[in-house]
Image (cartoon, rainbow, N blue to C red):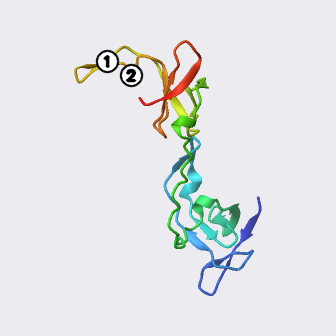
Amino acid sequence: MTVTKLQLSANKKLVCPKCGDELRFVEGGAVRIVNGKVDMDATLPKHVCDHCKVFYRELLHSGYYDEFPLKETEAPKTPPAPKAKPAAPKKKRVINTGDIPPTQLKRGADGKCPCPRCGERMDFVEAGPVQIVNGKPDFSNTMDHFVCPYCKSVFRKIVGTDYFQWSDK
């Protein structure tokens, strides 16, 4: 730990010993919790050099200061430069349904697998009982199948095989 006696400028402000710029005074803030521990250093005032990316904290009102590196979160916020229009997210290439051959799909530990049509992660839907929708039986979820949330594709198992094929619904 190296301590430094800071000098005053003509404006009665402390000056950085490295670059000679005036230091910006920052009042102490509230007590914070950092990584589950109380951070009392945040309550102490400090003198910041934005040019050198360091700050100085006085030791026991002695007139001597200890130097610390300035974290990026403590750096002053500069006004943002005018931004260009944000680029639209790139659309993924979605393969035509007629170009997808029957495919073996295996779900991973998370219950998902890559979609053969767009490459996103598909959700596995387990078979359930027949449901009545608007007074009519709905057989759509009576067999295991995969559903892709990105391209809205449904891949149903071909009976008697380990292959899945794209389905309308």
Cα gap from disc 2 to disc 1, whole angstroms = 9 Å
What SS does tag 2 mark? loop
Residue type at mark 2 is Ser
Q: Which residue is mark 1?
A: 131
Nearer to us: label 2 or label 1: 2
Asked if labels 1 and 2 touch by Cβ distance under 8 angstroms, the answer is: no
Foreground of the two, 32 or 2: 32
Q: Quadrant of the N terminus?
A: bottom right
The amino acid type of the residue labelled 1 equals Gln
Residue 9 located left or right of residue 19: left
Q: Which mark is residue 81?
A: none
Label 1 CA crowd tier, 10 Å (few <14, some 14–19, many 20+) = some
Q: Residue furthest right?
A: 2
Give the residue drawn at x 58%, y 59%.
Answer: 73
Q: Which mark is drawn over residue 140?
A: 2
Point 63% across, 87% down: residue: 10
Decide which of 115, 95 is in the foreground and name it: 95
Label whose residue precedes the other's in the sequence (2 or 1)? 1
The structure residue drawn at horizontal position 62% and vertical position 65%, both measured from the top left corner, is 61
Callout 1: helix, strand or loop? Answer: strand
Q: Position of residue 150 (x, y in %)?
A: 49, 40
Q: Residue furthest toward the front?
A: 98
Q: Position of residue 96 (x, y in %)?
A: 53, 40
The quarter in which the C terminus is drawn is top left
Specify the quadrant of the image occupied by residue 74. Answer: bottom right
| Within-10-Å neighbours for mark 2: few <14, some 14–19, many 20+ | some
| Image point (63%, 78%), residue name | 22
| 54, above or below 169, in the image | below
